[in-house]
Amino acid sequence: MADQDLDPIVLQKLQILQEKKEEAVRNEDYDVAMELKQVCDNLKVMANDLMHLESRKIQAIDGEDFEAAKILKSEILKLKKQIEIIDPHHPLNRNAHPS
């Protein structure tokens, strides 16, 4: 998955997180840099999962499997909410992430 394939909101969040990670490295705050890297990696995985679900939903619709499309739509909405919760300006705020 190339970054240009990502949802624009995800891409923007990743850019902000990358900048924060680079700042942490410049400040030699490697614990924060490691945590920010993990947040970036998790966000990329969620974005990849989202693209996969969207593709499967399109296939379900094309095959007129509307029950599957309905289930996939629900999964997509849940994943989008998880992505939305990630605040790139306060990515290490444990209260902002679902348990």
Image (tube, grey):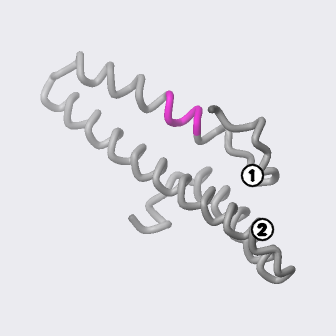
* Residue at mark 1: 91
Quadrant containing the N terminus is: bottom left
Give x and y (percent) for residue 19.
75, 71
Q: Residue at x 63, y 56 (%)?
A: 39
Report how far apart the C-alphas of labels 1 and 2 lie in the structure. Answer: 9 Å
Asked if 63 appears above or below 42 in the picture, the reply is: above
Q: Which residue is mark 2?
A: 20
- Residue 9: say if magenta: no
Image coordinates of residue 66 in percent, x first then y, are 23, 18
- Circle 1 sits in a helix, a strand or a loop, which is it? loop
**Residue plotted at (79% across, 45% down):** 93
Residue at position x 54%, y 60% in the image? 41
Q: Which residues are magenta?
A: 78-82
Image quarter (top left, top right, bottom left or bottom right) of the C terminus: top right
Residue lying farthest front?
31
Say what amino acid the circle numbered 1 marks. Answer: Pro
Residue 51 point in image, percent of width and height: 38, 47
Tell me whether circle 1 and circle 2 mark residues in contact (CB < 8 Å).
yes
Which quadrant of the figure has residue 54? top left
Q: Is residue 71 above or below residue 52?
A: above
Report the residue that reaches farthest toward the left: 63
User: Looking at the picture, does residue 97 appear above or below residue 34?
Assistant: above
- Judged from the image, the secondary structure of the residue bearing numbered disc 2 is helix
Closer to the camera in the image, 27 or 50: 27
The vertical placement of 12 against 76, above or below, is: below
Left or right: residue 62 versus residue 75 is left
